[in-house]
Image: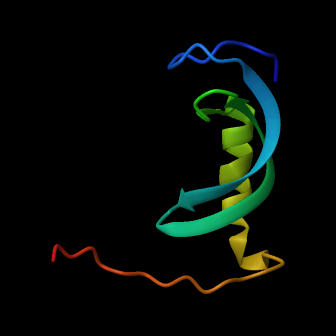
Amino acid sequence: MKEFECEYCGGVIQPKKVTVEHWYESKLVIIRDVPVGVCGECGERYYEAATLEQLDAIARESESAQERISVPVMAFALS
């Protein structure tokens, strides 16, 4: 990913590998080491189209995941 300017704050976008929480067909899949561009100022993430397609492909194969975790789900209620 080439370096460019953030459209929100003007910061410099730098390539990094991050963990992504990706929803696909009502399923949440956590994918590690995803290459993205991240703004050094505001943290906005920029994904290449090929990366987004690969996230969907990985999520489709989620039944063969190496690891599973349990996540609590709560309803938001005003007090």
Return the residue nearer the eye: 72 or 60.
72
Picture quarter with the N terminus: top right
- Rendering quarter of residue 59: bottom right
The answer to whether residue 28 is left or right of residue 67 is: left
Q: Nearer the viewer, residue 25 or 51?
A: 51
Total number of numbered labels?
0
Determine the residue positioned at 67% across, 83% down.
Answer: 69
Query: Residue 66's image quarter?
Result: bottom right
Where residue 71 appears, as percent x and y from the top left, is: 55, 82
- Residue 46 vertical placement versus 58 (above, below): above
Q: Position of residue 31 (x, y in %)?
A: 73, 60
Does residue 37 appear left or right of residue 1 in this picture? Answer: left
Position of residue 56 in the picture relative to residue 67 (left or right): left
> Residue 17 placed where, x, y %?
82, 44
Q: Residue at x 70, y 50 (%)?
A: 55
- Image coords of residue 45 (percent x, y): 63, 35
- Quadrant of the rendered image containing residue 39: top right
Q: Residue at x 79, y 58 (%)?
A: 32
Above or below, comparing residue 16 to residue 41 in the picture: below
**Residue sitting at 68 percent across and 65 percent down?**
30
- Is residue 74 found left or right of 26 in the rendered image? left
